[in-house]
Image (cartoon, rainbow, N blue to C red):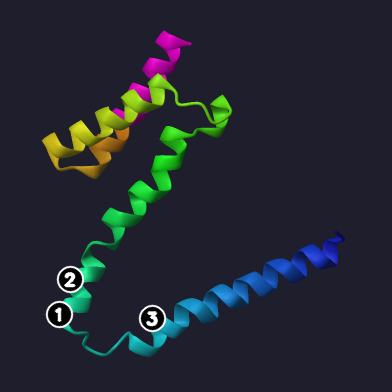
Amino acid sequence: MTTVETWAVILLLGVGTFVLRFSFLGMIGGRPMPEWVLRHLRYTPVAVLPALVAPAVVWPAATGGETDPARLLAAFATVAIGLATRNALWSILGGALTLYGALWLLG
């Protein structure tokens, strides 16, 4: 792929992303939305974040797709700290420290 083709793909993907987001946010942005839509949108981050993290925990690419005890331990620590503190930053920090500590201990 040439440099021009690469930039053309990047620009087209940028335009496509903008049009897709504008179709929802730009057209609906100022209008009031029904309560049932707002209720469902409230749970979107709760549904998206585990979907993004779960493959990295259960089938991590770093281990060739094999489940790793260090990553499972870090995931459990993150959830436990999040439930105990109700603070996303503390749970992320605790999960990261648990992951690095478990990788250091378990190899």
Badge 2: few (under 14), some or many (20 or more) residues near its Cα, within 10 Å?
few
Secondary structure that dominates the magenta span = helix
Which secondary structure lies at badge 3? helix
Q: Which residue is mark 1?
A: 35
The boundaries of the magenta stretch are 94-107
Q: Which residue is mark 3?
A: 25
Circles 3 and 1: CB distance less than 8 Å? no
Measure how far apart labels 3 and 1 are at the Cα level: 17 Å
Badge 1 crowding class, 10 Å Cα cut-off, few under 14, some 14 to 19, many 20 or more, is few
In the rendered image, the vertical position of residue 77 relative to residue 49, given as above or below:
above
The x, y position of residue 73, in whole percent, is 32, 23
- Amino acid, disc 2: Arg
Residue 54 in the image: x percent, y percent? 39, 41
Q: Mark 2 and mark 1: span between their CA atoms?
A: 6 Å
Residue that appears at 46% across and 82% down: 22
Q: Check whether the beta carbons of the residues at disc 2 and disc 1 lie within 8 A of each other.
A: yes
Q: Is residue 46 magenta?
A: no
Return the mark for residue 39. Answer: 2
Query: Residue, x 35% and y 55% (percent of image)?
Result: 48
